[in-house]
């Protein structure tokens, strides 16, 4: 019987599955069969070691993974093992707490679990009760602070504030937790924290579960947070067997509390623990694996291992530069079509990117080519709430009779027009025989108009009507991008979206992506722009057919695999993201994210970056990602990634405007360039790049430099902190002498990569 479970495994897998009980860490490289090892281990414990399923707990991170493992175990054992406890951390803890509710102080057995919407409502109520401004203290940011505290096992009573925002968070946390208890409710963080606290306070209860669970197995161990790790330690105790499977090189969820250092903690807490490396890969070619290892070994916390496969050799990686994001997307389309002619199906391909906003150019390219695609882990770009809101504003300006669009944004962002006021307003507008937007304009412009509104309601309606009137007038003589700037500025829409969380930043980036589309063609009328958007938004472009290509973020790609993978937007500020520039830990996580993306590919891997990327409506030069330099050149078609990066940086300076530029800086939404509209940089007549042809962008003759004395050496050094009057504090990526000036490349968190002429930028060195 034993051979039935072991004969299909490789030596390392077999060693892990048949290991004697005790602490064991299985370091499972990508594509090494970790799920196979976990399921075979459980089956082996039951069939070969005679362990009762009742004494086994298996912890996963998703319900889908739990179901898949249960199915595989049933097949291995020819039936479902009765008593096996398998599920997510939250599901296991919820079941345990209901069983032990009599030992909980503040809860009854029928406690409910609040979702995110419920939680936010409690926080909003807390802010109101505490008389705190929810614009100054965004509910989502407050909730994120509370969640972080719970993940670190910090209760309201033990919360130590170290600054003003911390003190506010503590007060809100106190109110929030009391409200949950009053409603006999827990949030998802409570499920874990309350279980750990129960075990701390009641050793007898903990001992009961230690006696039950002799074998504890956990998947994706590198993604555990402090509370989850503490829970595993409690249950395992000193005598039980803990079987942890993970890979610190694939830890990419720090933003939601995951701590890869738990792998290091495992060795600290279990000094006798064995380690088994799963290094044989069943997914990728050796070329892809060697390229990925070249990248990840640059991380200081990397656990040395050598991934190998029976798929020796393989196609070299292809790194190409496109002119802009549209050409990059079209090149992806062309290559997929070529691959389909070679026998691959459309669903063999996946296109990956760092941020959701990057999907816009790709979606439009697929739609334009009439090719099916499916978007994983995100809403289609033009269906995202914030994008639909902004488009609704434009529609009302274009057509004040559009009551549906006005209804969407009448109180978004909140401007004091609540439900009661809205009902009263709609009845009043109907009595005048006007559509709501028309009535707003009349209210703002006619001081003698009879109306039922008083106080705050009148002021809010009058102000919004005045803004709408101004936008309508503005739309007659400015480009769509400038009109959008005015709307975003007047509504303070960025403050509405950017609540201090990563999600808020991503949503604002989506709006800025739309701003870039609006500003891409200044000759386009508002009517034409809205028609163009509508045609994209209403196209049924999701297809479940076999030919549909997958579009997804790198975070969503974890656990997936595809024969052909395209990693796009490989530029400083995107990957690594600008928000990571100030932290070595954050940069290391960005490198792990790139590594995860690379190791999703089975047969072919395409890497792309652009010469210019449009952000905030402006086009600026882009610097190829530093991670490309880490790929051994012999694994690249044509080689020379480092040289190409250098050439790309050099070419960027020669392709700048012929005048000295402070205009490499990105204009904030709503701002206007002084002295009229600056001419856009002309686009060279270069076709979209080809993955298979070694095309290079032509290098024009450099423009004449102003006659100034050439600096003897660079003043700015890589890694320095500098302050810019508009962009704030940033980190110097690179600096060099260019002509008669020093050219400084700076990463500004939340803004992006900027290339600045030191003589004009006024940079201040601060560290």
Image: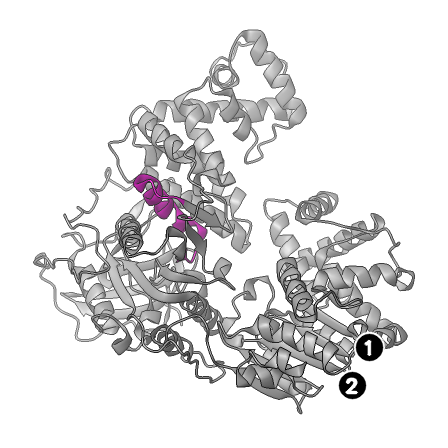
Secondary structure beneath label 2: loop
Does 150 sit left or right of 619 as displayed? Answer: right
Asked if residue 246 is positioned above or below residue 395 in the image, the reply reads: below
Residues packed near mark 1 inside 10 Å, few (<14), some (14 to 19) or many (20 plus): many
Residue farthest along the right direction in this orientation: 102
Does 16 sit left or right of 514 as displayed? Answer: right
Mark 1 and mark 2 lie on one chain; the one further toward the N terminus is 1
Residue 450 painted magenta: no
Secondary structure beneath label 1: helix
Assign the N terminus to one quadrant of the image.
bottom right
| Nearer to the camera, 594 or 342 | 342
Q: Where's residue 706, x and y in %? A: 11, 58
Asked if residue 375 is positioned above or below residue 368 in the image, the reply reads: below
Q: Residue at x 64, y 69 (%)?
A: 225
- Main SS, magenta region, reads helix
Asked if residue 749 is positioned above or below residue 431 in the image, the reply reads: below
Q: Where's residue 147, x and y in %? A: 67, 59
Please provide the residue range marked out in magenta: 352-372
Residue that carries the numbered disc 1 in the rendered image: 210
Residue that carries the numbered disc 2 in the rendered image: 239
Q: Where's residue 668, x and y in %? A: 37, 46
Residue 361 painted magenta: yes
Q: Quadrant of residue 631?
A: bottom left
Residues packed near mark 2 inside 10 Å, few (<14), some (14 to 19) or many (20 plus): some
Q: Where's residue 250, x and y in %? A: 51, 71
């Amino acid at each position: 019987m034993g051979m039935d479970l072991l004969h299909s495994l490789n030596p390392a897998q077999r060693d892990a599955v048949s290991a004697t009980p005790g602490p064991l860490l299985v370091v499972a490289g990508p594509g090494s069969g970790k799920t196979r090892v976990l399921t075979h281990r459980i089956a082996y414990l039951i069939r070969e070691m005679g362990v009762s399923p009742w004494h086994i707990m298996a912890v996963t991170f998703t319900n889908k993974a739990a179901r898949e493992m249960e199915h595989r175990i049933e097949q291995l054992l020819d039936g479902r093992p009765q008593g096996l406890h398998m599920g997510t951390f939250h599901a296991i803890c919820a079941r345990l707490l209901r069983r032990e509710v009599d030992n909980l102080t503040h809860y009854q057995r029928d406690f409910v679990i609040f979702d995110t919407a419920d939680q936010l409502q409690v926080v909003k109520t807390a802010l109101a009760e505490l008389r705190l401004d929810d614009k100054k203290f965004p509910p989502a940011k407050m909730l994120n602070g509370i969640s972080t505290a719970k993940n670190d096992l910090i209760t309201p009573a033990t919360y130590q504030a170290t600054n003003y925002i911390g003190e506010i968070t503590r007060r809100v946390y106190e109110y929030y937790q009391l409200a949950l208890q009053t409603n006999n409710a827990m949030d998802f963080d409570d499920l874990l924290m309350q279980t750990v606290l129960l075990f701390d306070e009641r050793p007898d209860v903990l001992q009961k579960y230690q006696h039950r669970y002799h074998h504890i197995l956990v998947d994706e161990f590198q993604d555990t947070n402090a509370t989850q790790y503490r829970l595993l330690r409690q249950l395992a105790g000193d005598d039980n067997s803990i079987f942890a499977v993970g890979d610190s090189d694939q830890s990419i969820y720090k933003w939601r509390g995951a701590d890869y250092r738990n792998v290091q903690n495992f060795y600290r807490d279990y000094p006798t623990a064995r380690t088994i490396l799963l290094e044989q890969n069943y997914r990728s070619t050796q070329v892809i694996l060697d390229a990925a290892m070249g990248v990840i070994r640059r991380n200081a916390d990397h656990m040395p291992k050598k991934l190998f496969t029976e798929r020796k050799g393989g196609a070299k990686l292809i790194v190409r530069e496109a002119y802009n994001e549209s050409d990059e997307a079209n090149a992806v389309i062309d290559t997929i079509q070529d691959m389909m002619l070679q026998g691959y199906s459309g669903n063999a391909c996946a296109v990956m990117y760092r941020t959701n906003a990057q999907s816009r150019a790709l979606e439009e390219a697929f739609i334009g080519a009439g090719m099916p695609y499916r978007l994983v882990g995100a809403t289609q770009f033009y269906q995202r709430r914030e994008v639909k809101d902004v488009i609704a504003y434009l529609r009302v300006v274009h057509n004040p009779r559009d009551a549906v669009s006005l209804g969407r944004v009448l109180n978004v962002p909140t401007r004091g027009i609540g439900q009661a006021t809205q009902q009263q307003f709609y009845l009043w507008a109907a009595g005048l025989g006007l559509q709501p937007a028309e009535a707003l304009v009349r209210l703002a412009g006619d001081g003698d108009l009879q109306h039922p509104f008083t106080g705050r309601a009148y002021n809010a309606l009058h102000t919004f009507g005045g803004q709408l009137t101004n936008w309508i007038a503005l739309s007659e003589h400015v480009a769509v991008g400038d009109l959008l700037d005015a709307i975003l500025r007047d509504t303070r829409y960025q403050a509405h979206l950017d609540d201090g969380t990563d999600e808020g930043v991503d949503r604002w980036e989506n709006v800025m992506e739309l701003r870039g589309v609006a500003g891409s063609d200044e000759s386009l009328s508002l009517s034409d722009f809205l028609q163009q958007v509508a045609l994209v938004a209403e196209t049924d472009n999701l297809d479940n057919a076999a030919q549909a290509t997958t579009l997804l973020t790198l975070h969503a790609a974890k656990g997936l695999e595809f024969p052909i993978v395209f990693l796009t937007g490989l530029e400083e500020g995107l990957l690594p993201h600008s928000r990571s520039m100030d932290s070595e830990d954050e940069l290391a996580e960005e490198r792990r994210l790139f590594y995860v993306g690379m190791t999703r590919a089975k047969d072919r891997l395409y890497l792309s970056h652009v010469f210019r990327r449009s952000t905030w409506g402006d086009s600026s030069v882009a610097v190829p990602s530093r991670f490309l330099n880490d790929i051994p050149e012999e694994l690249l078609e044509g080689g020379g990634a480092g040289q190409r990066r250098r050439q790309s940086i050099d070419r960027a300076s020669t392709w700048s405007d012929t005048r000295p530029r402070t205009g490499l800086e990105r204009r904030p939404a709503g701002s206007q360039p002084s002295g009229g509209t600056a001419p856009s940089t002309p686009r060279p007549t270069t076709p979209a790049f080809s993955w298979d042809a070694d095309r290079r962008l032509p290098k024009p003759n450099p423009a004449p430099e102003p006659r100034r004395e050439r600096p003897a050496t660079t003043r700015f050094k890589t890694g320095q902190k500098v302050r810019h009057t508009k962009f704030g504090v940033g980190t110097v990526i690179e600096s060099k002498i260019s002509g008669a000036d020093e050219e400084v490349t700076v990463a500004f968190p939340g803004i992006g990569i900027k290339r600045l002429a030191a003589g004009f930028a006024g940079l201040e060195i601060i560290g």
